[in-house]
Amino acid sequence: MRLFLCILTALFAGSPGYILTNDNLSGPPTADVFPHEGVIILNSFPKAGRYTDSEGKEFSYGITRTTLMNVSENSLQLTIHFPADSFAFVTFPGSYVKLFLLPDSISFNYIPFNNSSWYISDGLKPFLDAGLHTPTSRQEIISAKQERIFYIAALYHKTAGVPTAELVLKEQNLFFRPGRLDSLLITCGKVLFKE
């Protein structure tokens, strides 16, 4: 762990517009480090709660704070898209997960993401009520030596607890793994560098 922190500190030493903080490094259970590809992805522990939809169906949810760092000398185009459909788990018959990108209007600044815990978000329920069957997406440019923090909500039906979830990169493709106990890997976007 100490070697990992030294490497990250060296990567960002003297980089304009970027501050390396303990919040970025102290708690994430997963970190995909691809400095040769120009990208580092940090996934936080989940923050979890319960949600009941308008038909009385019960869900648990987990919110992951994902930090995508562009450590290259070029800007990159980030594209993320989660469809309106849900995805079935292989190892839990009858269970499924629905994914959302949460809007910036829902603030999580007051919530530490360096450990797993349960909480209720007042801003989340109206968003889920209105957008349960709506796709969410984001496309933006991340400048060289900059980062973008965003929040991914996973709504789980008939699963045991809220598993740790993560955004992962394979070549230029982004995937979301909503639980480590299942082989489900959901295609959700791309990272393309600009010359």
Image (tube, rainbow, N blue to C red):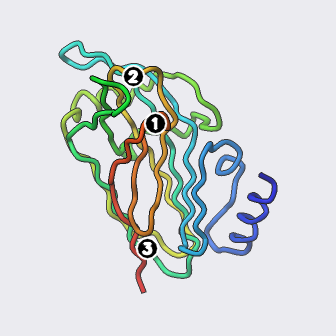
Q: Residue furthest bottom?
A: 195
Q: Which residue does the image show at 53% across and 76% down from the upper left?
A: 144
Q: Residues within 10 Å of mark 3 (few under 14, many from 20)?
A: many
Q: What amino acid does circle 2 point to?
A: Thr
- State the separation of the CA atoms marked 1 and 2: 10 Å
Q: Position of residue 167 (x, y in %)?
A: 46, 50
Q: What amino acid does circle 1 point to?
A: Gly
Q: Is residue 110 left or right of residue 175?
A: right
Mark 1 or 3, nearer chain start: 3
Circle nearer the viewer, 2 or 3: 2
Mark 2 or 3, nearer chain start: 3
Secondary structure at numbered mark 3: strand
Kindly indicate whether the residue at mark 3 contacts the one at mark 2 (C-beta within 8 angstroms): no
Q: Position of residue 169 (x, y in %)?
A: 46, 60
* Residue at numbered disc 2: 159
Kindly indicate whether the residue at mark 2 contacts the one at mark 1 (C-beta within 8 angstroms): yes
Q: Which residue does the image show at 20% across and 40% down from the upper left?
A: 85
Q: What amino acid does circle 3 point to?
A: Leu
Q: Quadrant of the C terminus?
A: bottom left
Q: Quadrant of residue 113?
A: top right
The circle drawn on residue 76 is: 3
Q: Which residue does the image show at 54% across and 57% down from the upper left?
A: 41
Q: Position of residue 26 (x, y in %)?
A: 71, 45
The circle drawn on residue 179 is: 1
Circle nearer the viewer, 1 or 3: 1
